[in-house]
Image (cartoon, coloured by chain):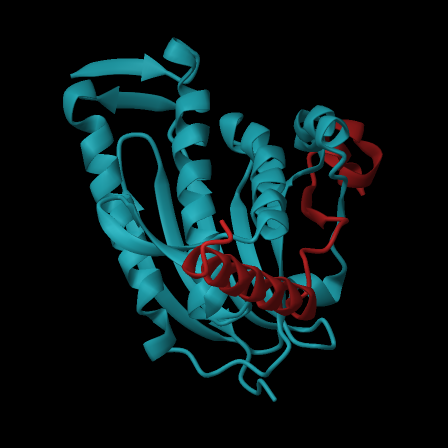
Amino acid sequence: GQAESDPSSASDKKVVLLPCKNPPNREHVCQWLEAKKQYECLQKWRRDTGLL
Amino acid sequence: MTTLTRQDINFGQVVADILCEFLEVAIHLILYVREVYPSGIFQKRKKYNVPVQMSCHPELNQYIQDTLHCVKPLIEKNDAEKVVVVIMDKEHHPVERFVFEISQPTLLSISSDTLLSHVEQLLRAFILKISVCDAVLNSNPPGCSFTVLVHTRDAATRNMEKVQVIKDFPWIVADEQEVHMQEPRLIPLKTMTSDIVKMQLYVEERAQKT
């Protein structure tokens, strides 16, 4: 059809894009959260015992 | 009342800044409300004068920022028709799609003293609707992930090429299964009409989530 032979309309066609990279997965985030909690616990213990 | 074109005071850039800031808050809140990530990574903040939940996970925050950095040039040129936050199940099939439909007027009639506070008030209503949307949606299956889609035109994609390279954050054309959902339930959440942008938010929810 005319649309196919017209380069301007071809370049104007609608497209849907998404990032090639994936966001961090849930398991990875859960591990990070657990490590953060342990670190905060350790810091609190150090403060409470006067080591910090 | 003044009439401005999109070229005056680089209006496209102002609109893109406002919308991207809003979309960042909205994405964080959607991920919290729909339990895509554990609630422990979210902290309460105040945006648009209402409490919201924002992630404190550095990698996730960077991902959301990089995504919006790439979307911003499209919004600036009025080339982003829709920005969609898609929540997917373990098999990467969409279960929910939060669709932000955006349109900007070519000619602007604005009263600058009331403009920003008015827009902020309208955006606040979107945030409040997102924060309670779990009441009208069914629970998602465990192990969901998310992505962000942008609906644009082929010719406009060159506007985002430079920032993709700078950020090392390439974009690709979505597959059919990522874009469409079979017989979704449509839930309108909010619409706004302001001098600088019109926007509506609705959710498409898959009928059978499990």
The chain drawn in red is: A
Would you identify the image quadrant in which residue A42 lies?
bottom right
Residue B27, placed above or below residue B8: below
Does B163 sit left or right of B32 as displayed? Answer: right
User: Where residue B74 appears, x then y in whole percent?
Assistant: 57, 32
Residue B17, placed above or below residue B192: above
User: Where residue B133 appears, x then y in whole percent?
Assistant: 35, 70
Residue positioned most to the top? B8
> Which one is in front, B19 or B201?
B19
Q: How many marks?
A: 0
Does A30 sit left or right of B171 as displayed? Answer: left
> Which one is in front, B114 or B51?
B51
Residue shown at 48% from the left, 83% from the top: B139
Does B11 sit left or right of B60 as displayed? Answer: left
Report the quarter where the N terminus of chain A lies: top right
User: Where residue A5 appears, x then y in whole percent?
Assistant: 84, 34
